[in-house]
Amino acid sequence: MKVDIGREIQQSAEETAGKIRGLLAARNVFSVNLISSPGSGKTTLIEKAIEALRGRIRIAVVEGDMETDIDAARIRRHGVQVHQINTRSSCHIPPFLLLSALDHLDLDAADLLFVENVGNLVCPAEVPLGEDLRVVALSVAEGDEKPLKYPLVFKTSDLLVITKTDLLPYVKFDTDRVKTAARAVNPRVEVFEVSSYTGSGLSSFLERIEELCRRKIG
Amino acid sequence: MHELGIANDILDIALAEAKKHGNRRITRVDLEVGVLRGIVPENLVFLFGHVAKGTIAEGAHLAIEEQPARVECGTCGTTEARVFTIGCPGCGSPTARVERGDAMRILSMEIDD
Ligand SMILES: Nc1nc2c(ncn2[C@@H]2O[C@H](COP(=O)(O)OP(=O)(O)OP(=O)(O)O)[C@@H](O)[C@H]2O)c(=O)[nH]1
Ligand SMILES: [Mg+2]
Ligand SMILES: [Zn+2]
């Protein structure tokens, strides 16, 4: 006998993401899900954002790693609220872990929540975290064919940040090729080119984040 | 790891549906998976067989229908892509839009009469 189902497989993830979205809306917090391969410079970008926006936007951070609280310790040094999630065997932050992590933060004292996902360009792309903004970072050392190999994360992100542009003289990386490939799957993606080491391009990226944040929280 | 979580989700949904029908044995599950999902069908089939062991879905056939991506090109119109392509497969135009291809849903299943 045939039974019709017609159900999205990740419906329970969508439901939990909906709860996160509701909670953050009620507390007037703008959330950013930051995704990249391991080591593309996510934590460094968050550190730069904290310093650049200090006194204007109150930042809180959730760090996702399979093991250790190394990244949370880095963030804590900047004097902002941070909670570390250890996902153990999971290669991404599942929504239920983010929901329980939010219990550890004082959301009324935050305007902008950065969620640094587990370093991985594949699985986090599948998983909704109720975020207002999804940002994918790609460092120039990783190769310019990445949007071709991992299309989903580029398709589902609002912003693409090309990081470590200070390394461009040393690597073969065609920025236009990346932009073209990313826009083919996602015509509305906004692209930024930054170096956290030299500071190049950081201000326009962070201004955009601040603008989008203010648009939500007023 | 990635496919394992999905295999578990499929099993959970199938078992919940079977419960509504007196927990009869599940013999087949039909899925639709978009080509942009990065899922390797053989891996998913293998892992589903593994997690279904010892349940009423043990031995069920997992049938995966691939959902192609739809490429919309200003010159060539709409074509279907079975693999991810940059730009239009017809004329190579980089401004072609890529739509769909990201489904992941259980369509139906077969249970014993
Ligand atoms: N050259 C260069 N190196 C950078 C830049 N930003 C970060 N790095 C270096 O890249 C390495 C990884 O940076 P992280 O910020 O830890 O990267 P991540 O994405 O948070 O790494 P995971 O959390 O492990 O996935 C460190 O050695 C950083 O100092 C940059 O703009 N230029
Ligand atoms: Mg990090
Ligand atoms: Zn064409």
Image (tube, rainbow, N blue to C red):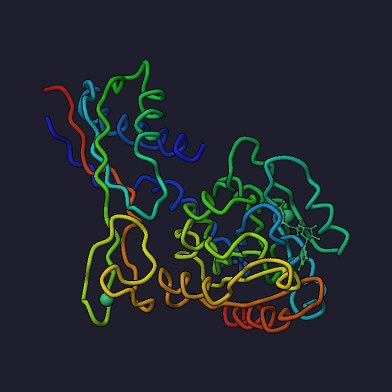
Residue B13, by quadrant, is top left
Quadrant that contains the N terminus of chain A: top left
Q: Is residue A139 above or below residue A104?
A: below
Q: Nearer the viewer, residue B45 or A115?
A: B45
The spot of residue A105 in percent (x, y) is 72, 56
Residue depicted at 49% across the width and 40% down the height? B2
The spot of residue B38 in percent (x, y) is 42, 49
Q: Is residue A79 left or right of residue B48?
A: right
- Where ligand 2 lies, by quadrant? bottom right
The spot of residue A184 in percent (x, y) is 41, 72
Residue depicted at 52% across the width and 36% down the height? B1
Residue depicted at 38% across the width and 28% down the height? B46
Q: Nearer the viewer, residue B112 or A143?
A: A143
Residue depicted at 44% across the width and 52% down the height? A15
Q: Is residue B69 above or below residue B39?
A: below
Q: Is residue B14 left or right of residue B24?
A: right
